[in-house]
């Protein structure tokens, strides 16, 4: 059989064949544009943590397969971090699992917990790997759409309730939320927790932006709500918090039974990863509060810089409460510039128009029409890069 008769990529993954990130990053290179599409920092994290990785490598720590659950130093540091920040206590030996980034944690968790046909409720727009991992696990995704309401994207709790069916197996919750920058409120999280307890659902929480909450409330992990500790798989990562996205060190914290289940899938994905980096991340998690505060403050200033610039350029800005992304509505730019509010067409034209690359939020939606007019910009870039991007974007208003 030839590929034209039967495509190589199987049916489960057919819809995930190409990603917009590759197309847009290529466009950034060929047009010499500033790439505010992909969300990774253009400056490395703390020098002392880089040095800790070098030291581990030189001392021969982690150069061979580390233990399956992760090196004890890191598991202990993760447990200490959860206790110190949130008062959540986890046994480092039975309730903590180190993964190859949050990406593997998400994949292993869904592969471990889902039966074919199980429904997974995820907040739409959602991080792109969720849909692919649910598909690989044979599950069915049920999106609940966050909609603009008074300047931010909010969850409609009635819609969430209405999405539940007897086949619902788990809720996949991301807060702080990529790409909208929404941070779920205590009230929203309380309602989600009540629903999960009432319906006896598992909850998987993607908390990779836990240290990028700009409001005073700070990050509230769902596992800390009543009845949630025993049904929540919490996922964290060093990539975003310490600006080492290439190290791919993530983790899962949950009950011994859930961690064992996730580990069963994880052992056949990567088995282990990032040996020397695990030791360095153990040191990073133990950094004083001043590191986390300075990191957040630096990103808050960048958020304000890019928000102001985008507003001046004519976008409607949804000022994010968390993450390092800003979602905008392009329609106020006018029908012609905004390509009639078509984010895809707009993002393809933006490099020529203004020398900047962004991502159309529609790629994060099943209901593409819901996301059509929204476009995401990343602000985890050097101030001079953001200044230049803002100067270029202002051409749109001219
Ligand atoms: C970046 C990101 C991840 C992936 O984290 P890694 O640790 O790099 O694998 C997961 N979820 C969200 C929402 C992200 O933005």
Image: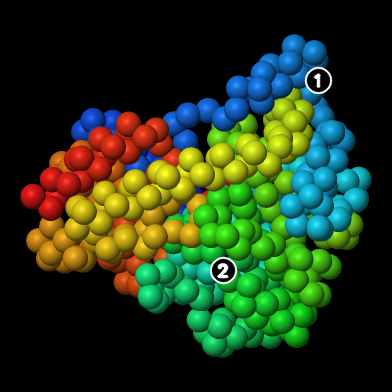
Toward the viewer: 58 or 365? 58
Residue underneath mark 2: 184
Q: Position of residue 318 (x, y in %)?
A: 37, 63
Q: Label 1, secondary structure: give it.
A: loop
In this picture, is 82 found above or below 117?
above
Residue at 55% x, 50% y is: 212
Residue occupying image coordinates x 79% and y 50%: 84
Q: Would residue 117 be found to the left or right of residue 323 on screen?
A: right
Please identify the quarter of the rendering in which residue 194 is found. bottom right
* Residue 223 at x, y percent in the picture: 75, 65
Crowd band around label 2 with a 10 angstrom C-alpha radius: few (<14), some (14–19), many (20+) = many
Mark 2 falls on what kind of element? loop
Query: Looking at the image, which residue is at 9% across and 61% down?
Result: 336
Q: Which mark is residue 326?
A: none
Residue 118 makes an appearance in the image? no
- Crowding at mark 1 (Cα within 10 Å: few <14, some 14-19, many 20+): some
Residue at image point 25% right, 56% down: 311
Q: Is residue 70 visible?
A: yes
| Residue 331 spot, x, y in % from top left | 21, 66
Q: Is residue 396 left or right of residue 237?
A: left
Most foreground residue, 266 or 232: 232
In terms of image quadrants, where is residue 333? bottom left
The part of the image, by quadrant, that contains residue 382 is: top left
Tag 1 or tag 2, which sits nearer the N-term? Answer: 1
- Give 79 or 32, whichever is nearer the viewer: 79
User: x and y percent of residue 82 in the render?
Assistant: 77, 51
The residue carrying mark 1 is 61
Q: Nearer the viewer, residue 16 or 252?
A: 252
Q: Mark 2 and mark 1: span between their CA atoms?
A: 39 Å
């Amino acid at each position: 059989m030839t590929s034209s008769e039967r495509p190589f990529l199987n049916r489960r993954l057919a819809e995930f064949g190409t990603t917009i990130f590759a197309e847009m990053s290529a466009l950034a290179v060929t047009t010499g544009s500033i790439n505010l599409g992909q969300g990774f920092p253009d400056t490395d994290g703390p020098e002392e943590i880089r040095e800790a990785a070098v030291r581990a490598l030189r001392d021969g720590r982690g150069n061979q397969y580390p233990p399956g659950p992760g090196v004890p130093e890191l598991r202990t540091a993760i447990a200490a971090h959860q206790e110190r920040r949130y008062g959540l206590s986890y046994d480092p030996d039975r309730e903590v699992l180190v993964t190859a980034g949050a990406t593997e944690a998400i994949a292993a968790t869904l592969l471990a917990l889902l039966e074919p046909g199980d429904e997974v409720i995820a907040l739409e727009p959602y991080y792109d790997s969720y849909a692919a991992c649910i598909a690989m696990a044979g599950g069915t995704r049920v999106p609940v759409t966050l909609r603009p309401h008074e300047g931010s994207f909010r969850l409609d709790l009635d819609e969430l309730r209405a999405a539940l069916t007897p086949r619902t197996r788990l809720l996949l919750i991301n807060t702080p939320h990529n790409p909208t920058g929404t941070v779920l409120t205590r009230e929203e999280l309380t309602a989600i927790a009540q629903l999960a307890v009432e319906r006896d659902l598992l909850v998987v929480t993607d908390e990779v932006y836990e240290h990028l909450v700009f409001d005073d409330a700070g990050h509230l992990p769902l596992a800390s709500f009543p009845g949630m500790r025993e049904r929540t798989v919490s996922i964290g990562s060093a990539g975003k918090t310490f600006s080492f996205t290439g190290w791919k060190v993530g983790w899962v914290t949950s009950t011994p039974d859930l961690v064992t289940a996730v580990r069963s899938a994880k052992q056949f994905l990567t088995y282990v990863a990032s040996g020397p980096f695990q030791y360095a991340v153990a040191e990073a998690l133990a950094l004083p509060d001043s590191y986390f505060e300075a990191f957040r403050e630096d990103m808050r200033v960048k958020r304000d810089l890019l928000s102001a610039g985008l507003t001046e350029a004519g976008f409607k800005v949804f000022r994010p409460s968390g993450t390092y992304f800003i979602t905008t509505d392009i329609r106020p730019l006018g029908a012609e510039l905004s390509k009639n509010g078509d984010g895809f067409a707009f993002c393809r034209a933006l490099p020529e128009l203004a020398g900047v690359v962004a991502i159309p939020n529609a790629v994060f939606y099943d209901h593409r029409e819901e996301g059509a007019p929204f476009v995401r910009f990343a602000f985890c870039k050097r101030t001079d890069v953001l200044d230049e991007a803002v100067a270029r974007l202002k051409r749109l208003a001219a």
